[in-house]
Amino acid sequence: MTVAQLRSSPPAYPDLLALARNPSPGSRERLLLGVVALCDARPPSGELSPVLGEIFLTLARQAERDVRKILSERLARADWAPPALINLLALDEIEIARPVLAASPVLQDDDLLRVLVEATLEHQIEVARRPHLGGRVADAIIERGEPATLTALAFNRTAEISLDGIRRMVEQSRRIAALRGPLTRHPRLTEQLAEQMYQWVGAALRQSICARFQIDEGRLAPLIDQSVYDARSGTMTPVPADDPDRDEMERRLVAKLQSAGQLRAGYLIRAARERRLGLFVHALATLGGFSVAQVREALAANSPEALFYACASVGVDRAVFPALLAEIRLLNEGVPGDVGDRIWLRGAISAASAARSFRALVKG
């Protein structure tokens, strides 16, 4: 049987027996997927025997990357899957680990805490996004204070975050701008904490806070005065206002790089890492032949879809996009939002198709 056939239907026992007798690596991989398909079709009534679990683990360790990825997808929601195998997949490279980190019922809090300690930042972000994330894991994420992981947690409405955890995240939003947007919309945000955030968020989020909690903006005006005083005293960093002169300077710099043939997709990543959002906007607009208004609309959207298409159209690799998106959210009060599917996981897209998709999503 082929891998495609194993993915679509469970094999017969004679087929599995034939694969077991064949020592080739390809047969071993098909045997592994065949047993998974069989267990999917006839789920075990209880835990797998230790021997069968060890067989799964041994075969998985020998499997090629593509087979491990299929295995992760097939076992992501299987409650019968061997815990040792699920933990092995959870610590594999991120494209393999993502399905089990997002959905496996086998992963327990201790397993997820181990991922936070041992795995990459992308793995940690996936843990923070996990539906119904337990309180212990949420507390560990908050304690670590990593901006991108905290931001992912702030977008996770089903995570078990305590009131003290929300309070600590609000305090973190003083320095991490990406937390502000999702926290103002978080169901566990209280009016008292919202009034604290009012001191350091931008005008749009202040309006959102007042609308949600029906707060009189006039009553909170003294808080703004105090925040200005604190900023001048050096006790906090104010959110920078729009600066037309700086915007023009960045436009000229991008134009100069373009005319010299030095403007490349990699410059977008550099601009984001250097915390120069305006430079990112002008560079993306110039590289893609878009208007600045179109790029800013993509940055303000409730979904990262338009931004992904714009970046893909100028040569940003889809594997790089999640990290770039995290950087942009840090600079842009948590937007683009997290609505919709992660379209960068769907597969490659041509530059021309990405540009057409981008223009279809934004105005003018």
Image: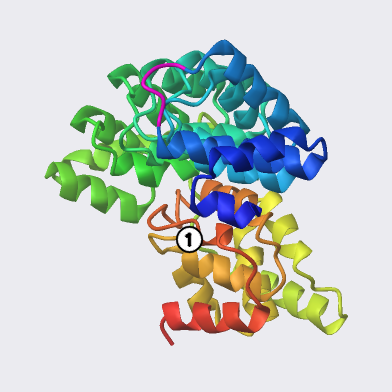
283 vs 321: above or below = below
Q: Secondary structure at mark 1?
A: loop
The reply, left or right, for residue 22 in relation to residue 8 is: right
Q: Which residue is mark 1?
A: 304
Q: Quadrant of residue 136?
A: top left
The reply, left or right, for residue 248 in relation to residue 153 is: right
16 vs 191, nearest the viewer: 16
**x then y, percent, for residue 24:** 82, 40
17 vs 291, nearest the viewer: 17
**x then y, percent, for residue 291:** 55, 82
Residue at image location 54% in from the left, 46% down from the top: 330
39 vs 57: above or below = below
**x then y, percent, for residue 275:** 65, 51
Q: Name the image quarter holding the C terminus.
A: bottom left
Q: Quadrant of residue 279?
A: bottom right
Q: Is residue 228 visible?
A: no
What secondary structure prevails in the magenta region?
Answer: loop
Residue at image location 17% in from the left, 50% down from the top: 211
115 vs 140, nearest the viewer: 115
The reply, left or right, for residue 44 in relation to residue 51 is: left
Which stretch is magenta?
43-47
